């Protein structure tokens, strides 16, 4: 899923064109962690998700956010720098670019597709139920909706 420098630059230019706090749709691909047995059998699973989000927000100046971060002991990483302020970070240790997103909890209209690739078989679209034997049970645990997420820029397929 790695991007060339040109593809990364085009994506960063597109992100710069999004107004601060403006809502947009994004398509992201990630790998789903499989069980050890599935991994040994050569099974890989990709999750393709399309959802509504926003970027360019600056929550660091909001008193409630600052207090919460301080009480949690949050310290910004010294090896990260903003490439596009409040949107794209670069980590000098890993060489990775990350997009900072603020998903909405209601009205995001997410669309999720799972792609299963088994050894020596073509990739196919499957349902959650089809994945049960391949995925750790903890993957399906309900998690609270995060206020902020970071997405590896190489996992971004499309912004629209």
Image: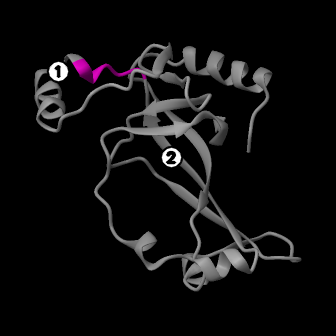
* Total numbered labels placed on residues in the image: 2
Whether residue 41 is situated above or below residue 69 in the rendered picture: below
Q: Position of residue 38 (x, y in %)?
A: 66, 79
Q: What residue sits 63% from the left and 20% below the top?
A: 12
Q: What residue sits 74% from the left and 80% below the top?
A: 41
State which quarter of the image contains the C terminus.
top right
Nearest the eye: 19 or 129 = 129
Q: What residue sits 55% from the left and 56% below the top?
A: 111
**Disc with the residue nearer the chain's start (1 vs 2):** 2
Instruction: Estimate the spatial distance between the alpha carbons at disc 1 and disc 2, rounded to whole Å.
Output: 26 Å
Nearest the eye: 42 or 27 = 42
Nearer the camera: disc 1 or disc 2: 1
Q: Position of residue 45 (x, y in %)?
A: 66, 67
Image marks 1 and 2: residues in contact by CB distance under 8 Å? no
Can residue 157 be seen from the camera position used here? no
Whether residue 84 is situated above or below residue 77 in the rendered picture: above
Q: Position of residue 112 (x, y in %)?
A: 56, 60
Q: Which residues are magenta?
A: 56-60
Describe the element under mark 2 as helix, strand or loop.
Answer: strand
Badge 1: residue crowd in 10 Å (few <14, some 14–19, many ≥20): few
Provide the residue designation for mark 1: 62
Can residue 144 be seen from the camera position used here? yes
Q: Quadrant of residue 103?
A: top left
Q: What residue sits 46% from the left and 37% below the top?
A: 150
Nearest the eye: 36 or 129 = 36
Magenta span: predominant SS is loop
Q: Position of residue 76 (x, y in %)?
A: 32, 25
Decide if residue 86 is on the left or right side of residue 43: left
Provide the residue designation for mark 2: 51
Describe the element under mark 1 as helix, strand or loop.
Answer: loop
Magenta-drawn stretch contains 15: no
């Amino acid at each position: 899923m790695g991007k060339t420098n040109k593809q990364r630059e085009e994506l960063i230019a597109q992100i710069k064109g999004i107004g601060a706090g403006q809502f947009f749709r994004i398509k992201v691909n990630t790998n789903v962690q499989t069980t050890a047995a599935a991994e040994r059998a050569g099974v890989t699973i990709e999750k393709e998700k399309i959802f509504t989000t926003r970027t360019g927000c600056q929550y660091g100046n909001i008193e409630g956010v600052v207090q919460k971060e301080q009480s949690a002991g949050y310290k910004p990483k010294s090896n990260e720098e903003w490439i596009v302020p409040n949107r794209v970070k670069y980590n000098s240790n890993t060489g990775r670019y990350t997009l900072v997103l603020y998903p909405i909890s209601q009205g995001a209209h997410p669309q999720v597709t799972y792609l299963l690739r088994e050894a020596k078989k073509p990739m196919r679209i499957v349902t959650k139920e089809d994945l049960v034997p391949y995925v750790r049970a903890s993957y399906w645990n309900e998690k609270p909706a995060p206020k902020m997420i970071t997405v590896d820029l190489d996992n971004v397929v499309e912004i629209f």
